[in-house]
Amino acid sequence: MFSKATEYALRATIYIAQKSSVEKKLSLSEIAQAIDSPPSFTAKILQLLTKDNCVIHSLRGPNGGFYMTEKNKQLPLKKILEAVNENDLFEKCILGLKKCSETKPCPLHFQYKPIKQELIHLFQTNTIQELSEKADNESLFINNAL
Amino acid sequence: MFSKATEYALRATIYIAQKSSVEKKLSLSEIAQAIDSPPSFTAKILQLLTKDNCVIHSLRGPNGGFYMTEKNKQLPLKKILEAVNENDLFEKCILGLKKCSETKPCPLHFQYKPIKQELIHLFQTNTIQELSEKADNESLFINNAL
DNA sequence: CTAATTAAAGGTATTTTTGTCTTTAATTAT
DNA sequence: ATAATTAAAGACAAAAATACCTTTAATTAG
């Protein structure tokens, strides 16, 4: 479904939302370990997420790291997809046809349409905060450990 | 969403269902041109689809080519995904977590679940025949031409 | 001010996916 | 039988995704 980059972006952001604040920043190594991702590759993805301070913030130096403001945490999940340039995933034709549209539909177009819209809805309506709260509770998790 | 290989597999199969029969076989070059895919790469994918004569049939030599029996055309789209080993796509966790399950769900698990099931349903209930009939009609198409 | 710490930036390496090309085998028409 | 035609098989190449590593810049603690 998603690329590894996008999966790491989603997991990392949920983790940062859950554990960080303006006062408490998280290091790259903590994040990568928590979400079970390769540190250096994760660094690249976190950089994308900090572009324009859009989704997460970062600060260099001792006690620096990655963090989110309360405002950031209110952003929809869609913002994460935008940051890693995978926002158009759900807009694409499921058969990979460039010209597929309402007026020139592929054979699956109208059956895929409602599903596509549910996916878009899912990422538009859920805030990062909401997801991180779920990850707090019970058996919900975001790492890959046994 | 899908890999190029899977997109080509779906488009090629729909085309073969639409245009071929036991009496009328289609050459690789015709198929690749019709669905706008690289011929040699498409050959590899068609080979997968002919394994065990599962989805399509092929015959070498003059007037040979690829074709489907009426029985083949009654198969669900899912068979195509199985042939190209992308059948488990919809089973996977949307966050890429190996251990995500009903009892150990990721934060998106229960929201993604119904969507996942609609996708599975879509590929299980639609036969190749049904899709190719849609591609026959009106403005429905399966190539990438203008 | 200096040293330590941390992310940013950029290059490199590996793996996977996608795409191409050549040779072989099967089939058919003559 | 022979030549032509077609897919199968397998080697090879290019591109993209993933992963790693080194240097630089920013920040802070002392």
Image (cartoon, coloured by chain):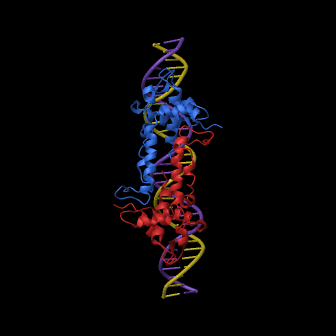
Chain colours: A blue, B red, C yellow, D purple
- Residue C12 in the image, given as x and y percentages of width and height: 51, 41
Total of numbered circles in the picture? 0
- D9 is higher (above) or lower (below) than D1: above
**Image spot of residue B71 (x, y percent):** 55, 70
Residue B111 or residue D5, whichever sits in front: B111
Q: Is residue A89 visible?
A: no
Residue that appears at 42% across and 27% down: A71
**Can residue A49 be seen here?**
yes
Taking the spot 48% from the left edge, 68% from the top edge, the residue there is B17
Looking at the figure, which quarter contains the C terminus of chain A? top right
* A35 to B29, vertically: above or below: above
Q: Locate residue B68 relative to residue B143 in the image: left or right.
A: right
Measured as percent of width and height from the top left, residue B7 is found at 47, 57
Q: Quadrant of residue B137?
A: bottom left
**Vertically, is A129 above or below B146?**
above
Q: Is residue A14 or residue B30 the one in the foreground?
A: A14
Residue A39 position by quadrant? top right
